[in-house]
Amino acid sequence: MQLYLSHTSPFARLCLVRALLLQQNDLRLHFTNPWDNPADLAEKNPFGQIPVLETDAGITIYNTHLICQYLHHDAFSPQDLAVTAYATSLLEISIQALKLVRFKAENSADHPLVTRCLDAVRRALPQAPELDAQSREWPQVMLGIVLLTVKLRYPDLFTRHARSDTAQAVALFEQLDFVRKTDPAALEVQPATIGDL
C-alpha cells in the first residue's frame, strides 16, 4: 500500500498516526504538495486532495475517515461517534479558515467565512469532549491530533478558549512517541515507510 500525503496536512497526519499505531510498517509514504497540482496525485484522486491511499490491489481510497476505516474496521459506540463527529467538525472548520486566509488576494479583506469559522472554533473549544491522552482508542487519538492541530495553528484561540483539563491533556498527548514521530517538522525528512518513522 502507498499513502500520498503532505508533511503539513493534519488530515494526512490522522492517517499516518492510524497506520503507525496499527504497525502498518510496510506502508509506503509518497510525499507531495497538493497545492502544486501534481499529475501523479490528480491521477489517483481527481479532486487533487490528500491523503490518498492506494491499496495493494490498486484501488484508490481518498477521504481521511475512509482511509482510517480501511486500515482498521472499528465498530464505534454512540459516544465514540460523538467524539469523532466533534473532532471532524473542529478540524474541517479550522482548516477552512486557514485556507481562506492563505489564498485570499493580496491586500484584500478576509472572506466573511473566516470570522464565522473562527467564531465556531471559539464556541467549540470549551465544549470539547474529555481527552484521555493515554488512550489508544481511535476516537481519543483523533481528538488529540485535532486539538493539537488547533493549538499549533491557532495558539491564542486555544489558550483563551480551551478548558484547563483540555490544555493539560493536549500537553501530555503531544509528548507521546507516535505524536512526536508524526509532527510536521519530523516529517520534513520524508520517510519512505511507516517503519522508518
Image (cartoon, helix red, strand yellow):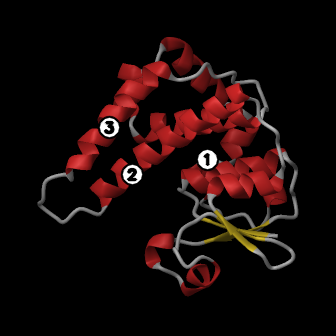
Q: Secondary structure at mark 3?
A: helix
Q: Earlier in the sequence, mark 2 or mark 1?
A: 2
Q: Is residue 119 above or below residue 66?
A: above
Q: How much space separates mark 2 and mark 3, taking CA atoms?
A: 10 Å
Residue appearing at x 34%, y 48% in the figure? 97
- For the residue pair 1 and 58, the one nearer the viewer reads as 58
Which residue carries the number 2 mark?
96
Q: Which three-letter amino acid code belongs to the residue tagged 2?
A: Gln
Circle number at residue 151? none
Is 59 on the left or on the right of 101, as rendered?
right
Q: Are marks 2 and 1 in contact (CB under 8 Å)?
A: no
Circle number at residue 183? 1
Binning the other alpha carbons within 10 Å of mark 1 as few (below 14), some (14 to 19) or many (20 upward) gives some
- For the residue pair 97 and 78, the one nearer the viewer reads as 78
Q: Secondary structure at mark 1?
A: loop
Q: Earlier in the sequence, mark 2 or mark 3?
A: 2
Q: Which three-letter amino acid code belongs to the residue tagged 1?
A: Asp
Residue appearing at x 19%, y 66% in the figure? 105
- For the residue pair 49 and 145, the one nearer the viewer reads as 49
Which residue carries the number 3 mark?
118
Q: How much space separates mark 2 and mark 1, taking CA atoms?
A: 21 Å
Q: Is residue 46 above or below residue 126?
A: below
Image coords of residue 39 (percent x, y): 55, 86
